[in-house]
């Protein structure tokens, strides 16, 4: 089973990389971008086959290592 973890800064946390992307897009004449936020995606190949156990395992990974839960939020997507 595969797990995809998407990690983004929480709303209200300054995102300097997102601002840099936003300014670069404007400089390249891409109009209509009001805000850009930058994040990361981590894909994991799991041996666990039970979805509930896999979700619990990946949640534990996020809480302990993958995400800084003070300033970041994460979403977990499981795939067969």
Image: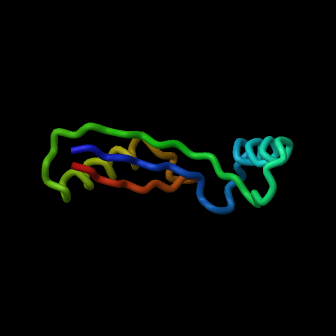
Question: How many numbered discs, if any?
Answer: 0
Q: Residue placed farthest to the left in the image?
A: 49
Tell me the quarter of the picture where residue 21 sits: top right
Question: Measuring 71% from the left and 42% from the top, which residue is drawn there?
Answer: 17
Q: Quadrant of the N terminus?
A: top left
Q: Position of residue 73 (x, y in %)?
A: 50, 56
Q: Position of residue 58 (x, y in %)?
A: 30, 48
Q: Position of residue 31 (x, y in %)?
A: 81, 55
Q: How is the image coloured?
A: rainbow
- Name the one closer to the observer, 17 or 34: 34
Question: Measuring 28% from the left and 53% from the top, which residue is drawn there?
Answer: 78
- Name the one closer to the observer, 27 or 49: 27
Q: In the displayed structure, does residue 71 sit left or right of residue 75?
A: right
Q: In the displayed structure, does residue 74 sit left or right of residue 19?
A: left
Q: In the displayed structure, does residue 45 sit left or right of residue 61?
A: left
Q: Position of residue 69 (x, y in %)?
A: 50, 52
Question: Measuring 65% from the left and 52% from the top, which residue is drawn there?
Answer: 37
């Amino acid at each position: 089973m595969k797990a995809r973890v998407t990690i983004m800064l929480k709303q209200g946390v300054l995102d300097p990389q997102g601002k840099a992307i936003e300014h670069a897009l404007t400089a390249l004449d891409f109009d209509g971008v009001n805000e850009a936020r930058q994040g990361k995606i981590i894909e994991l190949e799991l041996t666990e086959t039970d979805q509930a156990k896999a979700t619990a395992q990946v949640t534990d990974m996020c809480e302990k290592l993958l995400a800084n839960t003070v300033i970041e939020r994460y979403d977990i997507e499981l795939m067969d």
